[in-house]
Image (spheres, rainbow, N blue to C red):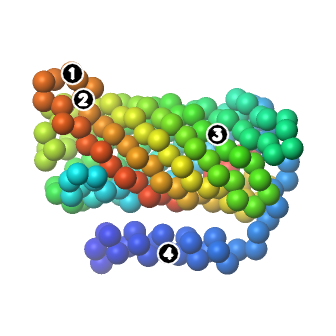
Amino acid sequence: MPMRVLVRRLVAAFLLLAAGATPVRAADPPAFGDWDLGLQAGYLFGVTNNSQAVTFLPRIGRMVWVSESGTPGVVSFGVEGIFTHFYETNSAMELGGGPYLRWRWVRPWVQPYAEVGVGMLYNDLKTFSLSSRVLFSVNGAVGAQIPVTDRVGVTAGYRFRHISNAGQDEVNPGLNTNIFCAGVTFTY
């Protein structure tokens, strides 16, 4: 079975599971200093090229700000890792990570979020002429977290990511990608 078909089936199963689950009203919003652990997996594809990949994004962070208003929001800051296996154009991988900052609107059923992140990656991408094995990344993401229990939620989102050698070489075409991802998060 091609990887693209497998990813589509996994996303469809996740959406059916989320749609059919009985909503659980989130208890109290997270407190300042609570830990935020998560793992997302996603399908990555190039904006201006035909790169395709599967990526895994583990993370650990802490709540650094919690709003006290009637519709609370939380900001978490932490470190996110990345492991990507490219299977279209050529077989390659990238491994790295870096800090992220995420804002989440804490609501009873669906909790939208937005985040930004930066990082460094080691890669063996040969097809895209990136001029270096060590690359830098910047990304922005939007999505939603759906509470399953008081401390567990499922996430689904979109992120745009740019990687390049950050001008360390004259040849610096960069690689822009879209990532659709889903995962699980634990707060304690």
Give the alpha-carbon distance from disc 2 to disc 1, as whole Å: 6 Å
Q: Secondary structure at mark 3?
A: strand
Q: Label 3 is placed on what type of residue?
A: Trp
Instruction: Looking at the image, tell me whether mark 4 or mark 2 is earlier in sequence order.
Output: 4
Q: Which residue is mark 4?
A: 12
Q: Is residue 80 left or right of residue 45?
A: right
- For the N terminus, the quadrant is bottom left
Instruction: Looking at the image, tell me whether mark 2 or mark 3 is earlier in sequence order.
Output: 3
Q: On screen, 86 above or below 173?
A: below
Q: Nearer the viewer, mark 3 or mark 1?
A: 3
The quarter of the displayed image where residue 154 is located: bottom right
Q: Nearer the viewer, mark 3 or mark 4?
A: 3
Within 10 angstroms of label 2, few (less than 14), some, or many (20 or more) residues?
Answer: many
Q: Which residue is mark 3?
A: 103
Residue 160 placement (x, y as % from top left): 40, 47
Residue at 19% across / 44% down in the picture?
125
Instruction: Looking at the image, tell me whether mark 3 or mark 4 is earlier in sequence order.
Output: 4
Within 10 angstroms of label 1, few (less than 14), some, or many (20 or more) residues?
Answer: few
Q: Which residue is mark 1?
A: 168
Give the alpha-carbon distance from disc 3 to disc 1, as whole Å: 32 Å
Instruction: Tell me the tag on residue 165.
Output: 2
Q: Secondary structure at mark 4?
A: helix
Give the alpha-carbon distance from disc 4 to disc 1, as whole Å: 41 Å
Q: Are marks 2 and 1 in contact (CB under 8 Å)?
A: yes
Q: Label 1 is placed on what type of residue?
A: Gln
